[in-house]
């Protein structure tokens, strides 16, 4: 239960999210970056599953499993596997959960998954499949007692009926067995605080870890918003637009994230989850500046 221990510790938890590399060259780059981040001793690391809805069932499964296994090593941090409903029957999901458990993951992120057309697209369950993430939480909880995490949305899910209903969905995920949540990319602490208030009003008491994505050299604010699925605060958008080079944008991203993480922790966040985008420099710089890391994991792997 190392994931839960970290969230219950007085020290802020630190976790890193990676996505499965597309090919051998990307796998080698990822290994280098993971090695570079290992000294920060994250409490857990997670690997996404078919994000964006792309790839066939077999490709998604293989890529995510391989990447999860690639993170294994001798000085272990807990590994958390993302799993989605997209394209899978219930029977297939059971097989996948068992396969991930064989590879000794210590947690799951139970997600519905994005439809092929993107987060706002029309999502249809697979024949014999599940419809909502709550059902996957229930399924995983029926197979194992490793901790289950779920998605939470400071700006509400793009297809949510209302912000209040979005928070009720989070409470339903908890009632189904979820023990922690990680938010979509969050660029401002006010949105996170508002989510905490809505969650509390809906009866969701599980720890909610804010997801932080350091902006690094992006080409435009519109692309950044489309990619992250989160609105950029005006002040951040202005700083990015007036930055003269990709390096200057990265510096803006680091400075913004340092202030943001401070504010998030002050607002009561139990830790911070970095969307690393499979790079390391910005995440490393932010952790160093804030003295974050040093979890019981002792490195990345396991
Ligand atoms: C931390 C994090 C990690 C992610 N990792 C991945 C990943 O690895 N791979 C990937 O493909 N995607 C990933 N996503 C994206 C996620 O799959 C999408 O945001 C997806 O659109 C919603 O997922 P969910 O688990 O919240 O779904 P759900 O909880 O099923 O919600 C989907 C929609 O249905 C509504 N809803 C839910 N339950 C009910 C109900 N009982 N009645 C009525 N309406 C309901 C919700 O309000 C929402 O509008 C991640 C998101 C986050 C925040």
Image: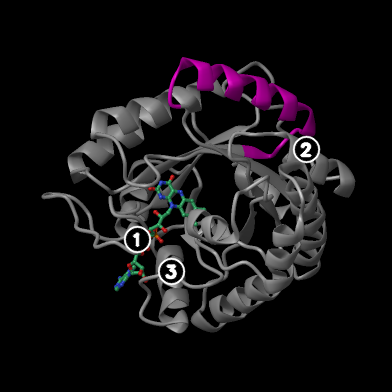
Q: Residue 292: which quarter of the image?
A: top right
The overriding secondary structure of the stretch rendered in magenta is helix
Mark 3 CB within 8 Å of ligand 1:
yes
- Residue 26 on the magenta segment: yes
Q: Earlier in the sequence, mark 1 or mark 2?
A: 1
Label 1 vs label 3, nearer the camera: 3
- Residue 100 on the magenta segment: no
Q: Secondary structure at mark 3?
A: loop
| 160 and 41: which is toward the camera | 160
Identify whether 265 is placed above or below 248. below
Label 1 vs label 2, nearer the camera: 2
For mark 1, does the 10 Å Cα neighbourhood hold few (<14), some (14 to 19), or many (20 or more) residues?
many
Instruction: Give the number of callouts.
Output: 3
Q: Which residue is mark 1?
A: 134
Question: Where is the N terminus found, in terms of image quarters?
Answer: top right
Mark 1 CB within 8 Å of ligand 1:
yes
Residue lying farthest to the left in this orientation: 127
Task: Determine which of the numbered discs, if any, sits on residue 157 in the image.
Answer: 3
Which image quarter has ligand 1? bottom left
| 175 and 99: which is toward the camera | 99
Identify whether 242 is placed above or below 160. above
| 160 and 23: which is toward the camera | 23
Where are the magenta residues, as a range? 22-44
**Residue 51, position as x, y percentages in the image:** 40, 44
For mark 3, does the 10 Å Cα neighbourhood hold few (<14), some (14 to 19), or many (20 or more) residues?
some
Please say if the residues under marks 2 and 3 sit with CB atoms less than 8 Å apart: no
Q: Which residue is mark 2?
A: 284
Q: Is residue 180 visible?
A: no
Q: Is residue 292 left or right of residue 82?
A: right
């Amino acid at each position: 239960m190392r994931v839960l221990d970290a969230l219950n510790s007085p020290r802020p938890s630190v976790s890193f999210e990676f996505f499965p590399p597309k090919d051998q060259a990307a796998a080698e780059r990822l290994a280098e970056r993971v090695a570079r981040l290992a000294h920060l001793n994250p409490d857990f690391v997670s690997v996404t599953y078919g994000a964006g809805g792309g790839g066939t069932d077999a490709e998604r499964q293989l890529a995510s499993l391989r990447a999860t296994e690639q993170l294994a090593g001798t000085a272990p941090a807990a590994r958390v596997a993302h799993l989605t409903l997209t394209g899978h029957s219930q029977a297939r999901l059971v097989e996948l959960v068992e396969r991930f458990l064989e590879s000794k993951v210590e947690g799951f992120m139970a997600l519905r998954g994005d439809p092929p057309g993107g987060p706002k697209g029309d999502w249809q369950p697979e024949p014999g499949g599940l419809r909502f993430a709550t059902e996957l939480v229930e399924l995983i909880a029926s197979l194992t007692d490793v901790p289950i995490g779920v998605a939470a949305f400071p700006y509400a899910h793009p297809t949510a009926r209302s912000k209040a209903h979005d928070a009720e969905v989070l409470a339903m995920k908890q009632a189904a067995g979820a023990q922690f949540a990680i938010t979509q990319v969050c660029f401002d602490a006010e949105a996170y605080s508002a989510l905490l208030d809505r969650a509390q009003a809906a009866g969701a008491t599980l720890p909610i870890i804010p997801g932080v994505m350091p902006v690094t050299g992006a080409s435009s604010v519109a692309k950044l918003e489309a990619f992250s699925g989160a609105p950029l605060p005006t002040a951040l958008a202005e700083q990015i637009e007036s930055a003269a080079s990709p390096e200057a944008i990265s510096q803006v991203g680091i400075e913004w994230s340092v202030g943001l993480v401070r504010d998030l922790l002050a607002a009561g966040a139990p830790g911070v989850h970095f969307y690393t985008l499979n790079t390391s420099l910005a995440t490393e710089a932010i952790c160093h500046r804030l003295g974050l890391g040093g979890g019981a994991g002792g490195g990345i792997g396991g």
